[in-house]
Image: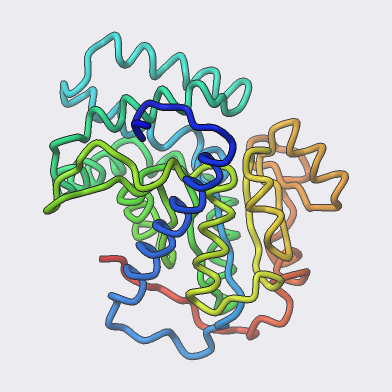
Amino acid sequence: MDVRFGRAGGRERALRARIAGQASAEVAAAAAHADTEPLAPGTDLTAAAFFDVDNTLMSGASVFHFFRGLAARKLFTSSDIVKFAIRQLRFRLGGENMDDVHASRAEALSFVAGRTVDEIVDFGEQIYDESMADKIYPGTLRLARQHLDAGQRVWLVTATPVELAQLIARRLGLTGALGTVAETENGVYTGRLVGDLLHGPAKAAAVRALAATEGLDLRRCTAYSDSANDIPMLSVVGTAVAVNPDSALRDTARRNGWQSIDFRTGRKAAQIGAGSLLGIGAVSGAVAGGLAVRRKLR
């Protein structure tokens, strides 16, 4: 079946999710270990934090912001942008829709096929400054940095292409990123994915695979997301936190006793300090006053 456009059955989807998760973890670990700087003294080697990106760390969909930047460079037609805008509106009003996810995947892969990784990364660097930097939720970033200050590593986990995810992580001073891995040959995109999008169960697979590689104790790890689609990822760690949650995730968080925080409004929930999170569950036992881990992704 064509990885770009086909819909797989249940078993094949599960297999692709595992392949996508493993591939993403391998890329993340390789990028982290390519850093010649040793881990900072006081680094907690068994606890970490995992943050979803779209509507958790960043307002809106990072890929939409990226495509809008490409449109400004005349790399998309007006009709393409209208379709992206409609999907973005549905995303903001009603959460993720898998038909939109698959359609966006097909269009994105069609666009990158034949282009070099360096070219896409260069576009990403420019567009981050133009359209993404001001979309970061300060409250969520504050949570991430408090994990770093406690000596824990912090990874983004997103369906966004891994190159763009790594760029966002690097710009924010985070450890690294787990993202969708697109196949390349000699530094050129083929238009195919390795496995599938890093979405839903694939995110959980990636977190498990990275934990195995890095020696993390998932019971001491924390995950943050806005979407019920990320319940598999939230369920594999010791502490799950719903950030700007959709209604389905809010209900699940309430049933499971997960903490909810909303940075979209002035509600009291948005004022909950990150310190209260660092004192519970997976983060407990972190080295007090540990130095932040500031790893540079290559």
Of residues 213 and 123, the one nearer the viewer is 213
Labels in figure, total: 0
Q: Quadrant of residue 151?
A: bottom right
Quarter the N terminus occupies:
top left
Q: Relative to 274, is 140 above or below? A: above
Expressed as whole percent of the image width and height from the top left, the position of residue 235 reads: 71, 55
Residue at position x 56%, y 24% from top? Answer: 97
Expressed as whole percent of the image width and height from the top left, the position of residue 272 reads: 74, 54
Outermost residue on the top side: it is 79
Of residues 288 and 268, the one nearer the viewer is 288
Expressed as whole percent of the image width and height from the top left, the position of residue 196 reads: 43, 42
Of residues 293 and 31, the one nearer the viewer is 31
Q: Quadrant of residue 229?
A: top right
Residue at position x 39%, y 64% from top? Answer: 28
Quarter the C terminus occupies:
bottom left
159 vs 79, left or right, is right
Q: Relative to 279, is 20 above or below? A: above
Residue at position x 41%, y 41% from top? Answer: 134
Expressed as whole percent of the image width and height from the top left, the position of residue 248 reads: 75, 33
Residue at position x 70%, y 37% from top? Answer: 266
186 vs 277, left or right, is left
157 vs 244, left or right, is left
Q: Relative to 253, is 105 above or below? A: above
